[in-house]
Amino acid sequence: MAIDIGRRKFVAALGGAAGWPLAARSQQPTLPVVGFLHGGSADSAAPRVAAFRKGLNQTGYVEGQNVTVEYHFLEGRYNRLSALMADLVGRRVAVIAIPGSIPSALAAKAATATIPIVFGVADDPVRLGLVASLARPGGNATGVNYFANETGA
């Protein structure tokens, strides 16, 4: 009988110990997710992706260590924007990064008023309705204007 009780204690202890790694994993904080969206292909976006990663690293963010980046390349299929934005907003990503795509920046702005949006556009972001003003963008969107249209002859 004593052997049976010892066996039960052993099995119970083993069962409890087996649950430790699962409990520890479930308690680890999840990494913030950045949704990176480009209107072109992965190949055409390679320079922007490299610059984005470099900027993250310079500010202390390393993919897979303290941030997760989800890369989405539309390859010109902007009809996918609504579903993609709904997915990113529904999962409450930490930031939506949109370098160089006016339609994507506008779709992000229409999809959320709370998730930060960082954009890069070659047009006036005030005229586009992305920000209230250049001096005080307000809202949840901020970014860079390349002034490409303003400098053209």
Image: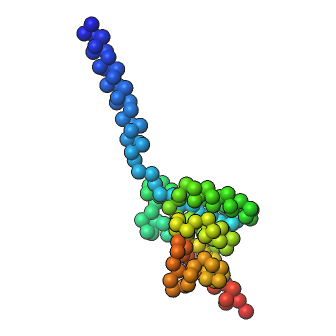
Residue 50 in view here:
no
Depth check: give the residue in front, 43 or 84.
84
Depth check: give the residue in front, 153 or 43.
153
Using the image, determine if residue 114 lies above or below residue 28: below
- State the colouring used for the structure image: rainbow
Depth check: give the residue in front, 133 or 47.
133
Residue 113 on image: x %, y %: 55, 68
Residue 41, quarter of picture: bottom right
- Indicate left or right for 94 with 44 as reference: left
The N terminus lies in quadrant: top left
- Indicate left or right for 76 with 87 as reference: right
Residue 82, quarter of picture: bottom right
The C terminus lies in quadrant: bottom right
Using the image, determine if residue 41 lies above or below residue 120: above
Q: Residue at x 52, y 74 (%)?
A: 139
Residue 86 on image: x %, y %: 63, 58
Q: How many marks?
A: 0
Q: Residue at x 69, y 71 (%)?
A: 103
Residue 94 on image: x %, y %: 50, 61
Depth check: give the residue in front, 93 or 59.
93
